[in-house]
Image (cartoon, rainbow, N blue to C red):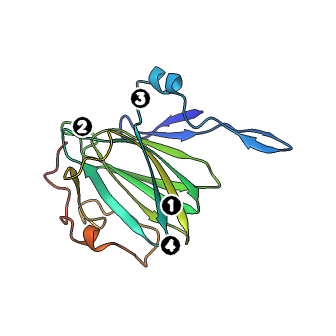
């Protein structure tokens, strides 16, 4: 696995290194020893899947409130997404900054999103599936977030025709004041 540090401290792009032969390909996507050697979370206790019927679907920007801050390992297993994380860590030099990039079933890339970040994504094609490994497990009542179109962030979502849930539409309009 190749770990590339992102501009947001503690966040990584992870690129599996497939072994390819006449049968196809095989690659590690997680190794506790490798993650631990980099000081990354290894106790990813919950695995979740998101199925999205239409291109342009936005899920986010979500996080769990303290003391239930989440670490996520995110990958796209079918289709493609524009995945976004926002640093909300109190005292972080990159507080309020975002990073986004394409994850797809074809590129095999993953993002490691540390505690103290909001997360969201937009599907780039119909019938997209996203796989999450998370710690800690979801805690009812701890979920929070802000709108995907927060003008202070000006995230450049690639698909103009947005599909969004009523729950996400009703989130606060800005991250300003959120510090984790």
Residue 60 locus on image (x, y percent):
33, 60
Residue 112 locus on image (x, y percent):
44, 40
Graded by Cα atoms within 10 Å as few (under 14), some (14 to 19) or many (20 or more), the crowding at tag 3 reads some
In the picture of the structure, the residue carrying the numbered disc 4 is: 53
Mark 3 / mark 1, whichever is N-terminal: 3
Mark 1 or mark 2, whichever is nearer to me: 1
Mark 3 / mark 4, whichever is N-terminal: 3
Q: How far apart are labels 3 and 4 at the CA level?
A: 33 Å
Q: What residue is shown at x 43% (from left), y 79% (from top)?
A: 161
Q: What residue is shown at x 40% (from left), y 75% (from top)?
A: 162
Q: How far apart are labels 2 and 4 at the CA level?
A: 36 Å
Tag 2's secondary structure? loop
Q: Quadrant of the N terminus?
A: top right
Residue 12 locus on image (x, y percent):
46, 38
Q: How far apart are labels 3 and 2 at the CA level?
A: 17 Å
In the picture of the structure, the residue carrying the numbered disc 2 is: 92
Would you place residue 115 above or below residue 155 in this image? above
Residue 168 locus on image (x, y percent):
28, 67
In the picture of the structure, the residue carrying the numbered disc 3 is: 40
> In the visual, does 114 lie left or right of 14?
left
Q: How far apart are labels 3 and 1 at the CA level?
A: 24 Å
Q: Are marks 1 and 2 in contact (CB under 8 Å)?
A: no
Tag 1's secondary structure? strand
């Amino acid at each position: 696995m190749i770990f590339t540090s992102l501009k947001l401290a503690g966040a990584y792009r992870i690129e599996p290194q497939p072994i390819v032969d006449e049968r196809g390909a095989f690659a590690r996507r997680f190794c506790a020893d490798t993650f631990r050697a980099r000081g990354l979370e290894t106790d990813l206790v919950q695995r979740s899947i998101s199925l999205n019927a239409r291109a342009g679907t936005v899920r986010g920007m979500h996080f769990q409130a303290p003391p239930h801050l989440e670490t996520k390992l995110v990958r796209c297993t079918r289709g493609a997404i524009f995945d976004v994380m926002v640093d909300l860590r109190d005292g972080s030099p990159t507080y309020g900054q975002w990073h986004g990039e394409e994850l797809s079933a074809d590129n095999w890339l993953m993002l490691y999103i540390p505690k103290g970040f909001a997360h969201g994504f937009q599907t780039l094609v119909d019938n997209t599936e996203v796989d999450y490994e998370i710690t800690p497990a979801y805690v009812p009542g701890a979920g929070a977030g802000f709108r995907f179109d927060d003008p202070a962030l000006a995230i450049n979502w690639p698909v103009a025709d947005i599909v969004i849930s009523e729950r996400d539409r009703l989130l606060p309009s800005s991250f300003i004041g959120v510090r984790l």
